Amino acid sequence: MNRRQLLERVAPVREAYAEHGLATHAAAIAFRVLVALVPLTLLALALLGAFGLSDTWHDAIAPELRKKLQPEVFRAVDSVVTQILESPSAGLILFAGALLLWELLRGVRAASRALNTIHEVEDQRPARKVALVTLGLSVAVGACLIGAAFATIVGGRLGLLASILRWPVAALLLGLAVALLVRYAPAEHPDPKWASVGSAVIVAGWLLLSIGFGIWVRDVASYQGATGSLFAFLVLTAYVLWVSAVFLIGVEIDEALRNGRAPTRRSRGGRSGRGKSSSSR
């Protein structure tokens, strides 16, 4: 396939991405993910302590942070983390879990609105059904993402076999999270057989972005001074934004394949009067 043929195949997805305003939806999802990182980190530390895996912090994470943080900053961070690891309480785990679930609920709703835009449907499901679906997806997707993170972080410390298997396990869990969101989050439920190419793009994109971000954090990032800390936050924001964009691009690919054609160009007035009703499906 030459460059021209590649551009011709990519063009419909690129045009649909712009027409559906998915950059705005990606930013909304990314914001919810950034906010959720705070309770996620707190929950992860509490669980590491509860399962007796505090050496993951002391042997793998803390030494790398020591090189990049100012001594007084590292001592403060290490003191707080050590206190959480040594005395993980059920109350802390419940609090962090509840806060994370709340942010996941809002993130899933943001993803649902984006998927409805891609499928060009109006969400006319009963409010109770939407709430139950959102809750179920939040719990399931959150479990998959936490499991994938634990598999990659902890798996490298459990021997050669676990170190090799952690990446397939993480990919499987990420694929399951994507499949659940694509299948059940929108008002229109796409045919599962079409949720393969786009899902593969999403999982592959997420893994590549995560590997690149991990290399940057380990080998490039420096948190010495205000400039380094600000730049690190900007890189984290860009990473989360690209992760959100890749998710929506993958869904848009599936929609283009399902339609068998390039998405119809719509007027700047949006979907008003032209959106498909979810109740008619």
Image (cartoon, rainbow, N blue to C red):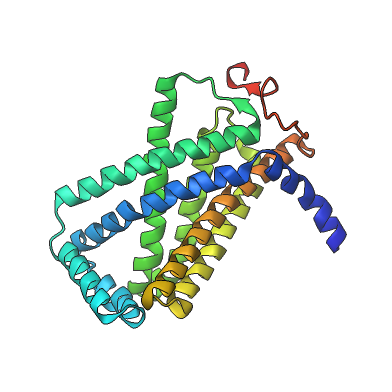
Q: Position of residue 160 (x, y in %)?
A: 40, 76
- Point 50% across, 44% down: residue: 28
- Point 53% across, 20% down: residue: 124
Relative placement, left or right, of 64 versus 243 is: left
Q: Position of residue 41 (x, y in %)?
A: 31, 58
Relative placement, left or right, of 146 versus 252 is: left
Q: Quadrant of residue 16?
A: top right
Vertical placement of residue 99 versus 156, above or below: above
Please say whether residue 190 is visible from this viewpoint. no
Quarter occupied by the N terminus? bottom right
Please say whether residue 277 is visible from this viewpoint. yes
Nearest the camera: 188 or 230? 230
Vertical placement of residue 39 versus 118, above or below: below
Looking at this view, name the residue that lies furthest to the front.
226
- Point 26% across, 74% down: residue: 73
Relative placement, left or right, of 76 versus 22 is: left
Vertical placement of residue 62 versus 41, above or below: below
- Point 29% across, 76% down: residue: 62
Quarter occupied by the C terminus? top right
Nearest the camera: 58 or 75? 75
Nearest the camera: 252 or 155? 252
Q: Quadrant of residue 101?
A: top left
Q: Position of residue 157 (x, y in %)?
A: 33, 73
Vertical placement of residue 109 versus 88, above or below: above
Q: Position of residue 144 (x, y in %)?
A: 41, 50
Tally the numbered discs: 0
Relative placement, left or right, of 8 versus 16 is: right
